[in-house]
Amino acid sequence: MKAGKTMTGKEILYSILMNNNVVYSIENNLEALLNSIPELKDTIGFDHKHPHHHLDVWNHTLCALSHAPSNFDLRLVLLLHDIGKPHSCQEGEVRHFKGHPLKSYEMSLVILERLNFTQEEINHLSKLILVHDDE
């Protein structure tokens, strides 16, 4: 990240997410990322308890990011796509997350506004988050 100048939340995200090794970049800038998006803390260590997911929500997100091309919008959507899972789970022997795209969408509206994204950017990015689980 840039030294000397105070970066905006959006600039911090861009700096972290556009690194060639995005997972390494996230791990080495985790404090700055969590300061910008504290809502991510709830995903760290949050077990899916589901046979289709062997990773916790945070590591699932990192895995998805590790396969993403170098595109800021796509990487940001991947970062936020499951942020609502800890707040929308149905407990049982197997956890379900019905409604998590809507919760992730709602949370992304607040996050993106707080980080000074334009309304056009917010509409575009949050819509992708909302429909990420559509078949």
Image (cartoon, grey):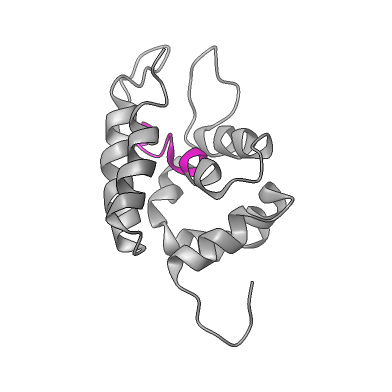
**Considering only vertical position in the picture, is 66 above or below 12?**
above
Measured from the top left, where is residue 134 in percent x and y?
Answer: 38, 17
The quarter in which the C terminus is drawn is: top left
Residue at figure coordinates x 35%, y 14% from the top left: 92
Q: Is residue 2 visible?
A: yes
User: Could you say where residue 111 lies in the image, as x and y percent from the top left?
Assistant: 33, 54
Residue 19 or residue 107, whichever sits in front: 19
Question: On the picture, is 122 further left or further right than 3?
Answer: left
**129 in magenta:** no
What segment is highlighted magenta in the picture?
A: 77-86
Please identify the quarter of the rendering in which residue 14 is found: bottom right
Left or right, 30 with respect to 94, comes to right
What residue is rendered at 36% in x and 51% in y? 121
Q: Is residue 88 above or below residue 22?
A: above
- Where is residue 107? Give x, y as percent: 29, 45
Residue 50: x percent and y percent? Answer: 49, 16
Q: Is residue 44 visible?
A: no
Is 99 situated above or below 42? above
Secondary structure mostly seen in the magenta stretch: helix
- Which corner quadrant holds the N terminus? bottom right
Judged left or right of residue 114, residue 61 is: right
Whether residue 78 is in magenta: the answer is: yes
Indicate the quadrant where residue 115 lies.
Answer: bottom left
